[in-house]
Image: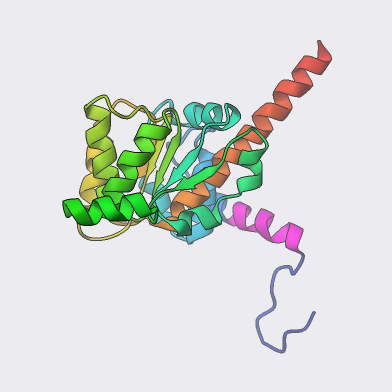
């Protein structure tokens, strides 16, 4: 196909573009300390952002990948801090195991309570989610106050997340909230610094759901061989 430019794309075949992208990521990233279980998440985050610095800054709790896969296969909900995160998640893979994505940031009771208390809607949405969704995957890409409130509730014994994916982007409290998350002994995926955002946490969730589908298929195949 001729685009009328001097540049010639490596391929225009949709099934080949992702594979070539992943190959280029692996070659450019080079040596790293991520485990084989963690690397698919790293790869998809770099694929979504084209940011190798961000990819190298990722930090995983040792149980993060297994906790995420288990939560998905157990049908636990994914709680997103904003609608942008909800929009990007591959929900059909969650639905396969009974899961769903929940976002409370615009719920009328959340808006009303935030105004009455003079707090951010993200804080009030986090409180609502923690009361309703123990064992869920909490996904925070935009609101550092949501992550800080979640950390407070965990320390107080009022929140029991299955996994926290905390990578809010920004300047006010973003890096600091991630520093606090890394101090907790709970399953988490985060990064160091100010970078993050909706696209990044969506990539992490989608990578985990793909791993969950693969795990389920491997389990089914193993059972059939018995």
Relative height, residue 186 to residue 210 (above, below)? above
One can see residue 193 in this view: no
One can see residue 102 in this view: yes
In the picture, measured across the screen, residue 58 lies left or right of residue 22, that is: left
Q: How is the image coloured?
A: rainbow
The residue at the far top in this view is 226
Q: Residue 223 placed where, x, y %? A: 77, 15
* Overall secondary structure of the magenta section: helix
Q: Residue 186 placed where, x, y %? A: 34, 27
Q: Nearer the viewer, residue 1 or 137?
A: 137
In the picture, measured across the screen, residue 9 lies left or right of residue 195, that is: right
The residue at the far bottom in this view is 4
Q: Nearer the viewer, residue 22 or 97?
A: 97
Relative height, residue 74 to residue 128 (above, below)? above
The residue at the far left in this view is 118
Q: Quadrant of residue 159?
A: top left
The residue at the far right in this view is 225
Q: Residue 36 placed where, x, y %? A: 54, 33
Relative height, residue 212 to residue 22 (above, below)? above
* Quadrant, the C terminus: top right
Specify start and end residues of the magenta stretch as a single range. 14-24
Q: Nearer the viewer, residue 60 or 35?
A: 60
In the picture, measured across the screen, residue 142 lies left or right of residue 67, that is: left
| x 74%, y 69%: residue | 12
Q: Nearer the viewer, residue 179 or 130?
A: 130
Q: Residue 158 placed where, x, y %? A: 28, 28
* Quadrant, the N terminus: bottom right
| x 36%, y 42%: residue | 190
Q: Is 17 contained in the magenta span?
A: yes
| x 54%, y 57%: residue | 87
């Amino acid at each position: 196909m001729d685009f009328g430019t001097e540049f010639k794309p490596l391929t225009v075949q949709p099934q080949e573009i992702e594979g070539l992208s992943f190959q280029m990521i692996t070659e450019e990233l080079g040596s790293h300390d991520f485990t084989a279980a963690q690397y698919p998440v790293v790869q998809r985050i770099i694929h979504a952002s084209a940011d190798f610095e961000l990819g190298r800054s990722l930090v995983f709790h040792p149980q993060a990948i297994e906790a995420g896969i288990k939560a998905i296969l157990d049908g636990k909900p994914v709680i997103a801090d904003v609608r942008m995160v909800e929009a990007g998640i591959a929900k059909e893979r969650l639905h396969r195991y009974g899961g769903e994505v929940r976002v409370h940031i615009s719920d009328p009771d959340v808006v009303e309570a935030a105004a009455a208390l003079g707090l951010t809607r993200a804080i009030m949405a986090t409180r609502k989610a923690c009361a309703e969704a123990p064992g869920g995957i909490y996904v925070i890409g935009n609101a550092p106050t949501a992550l800080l409130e979640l950390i407070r509730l965990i320390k107080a014994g009022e929140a029991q997340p299955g996994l926290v994916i905390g990578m809010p982007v920004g300047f006010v409290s973003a890096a600091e909230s991630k520093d606090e998350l890394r101090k907790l002994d709970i399953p988490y995926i985060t990064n160091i610094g100010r970078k993050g955002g909706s696209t990044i946490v969506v990539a992490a969730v989608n990578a985990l759901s793909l791993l969950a589908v693969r795990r389920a298929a491997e389990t089914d195949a193993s059972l059939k061989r018995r």
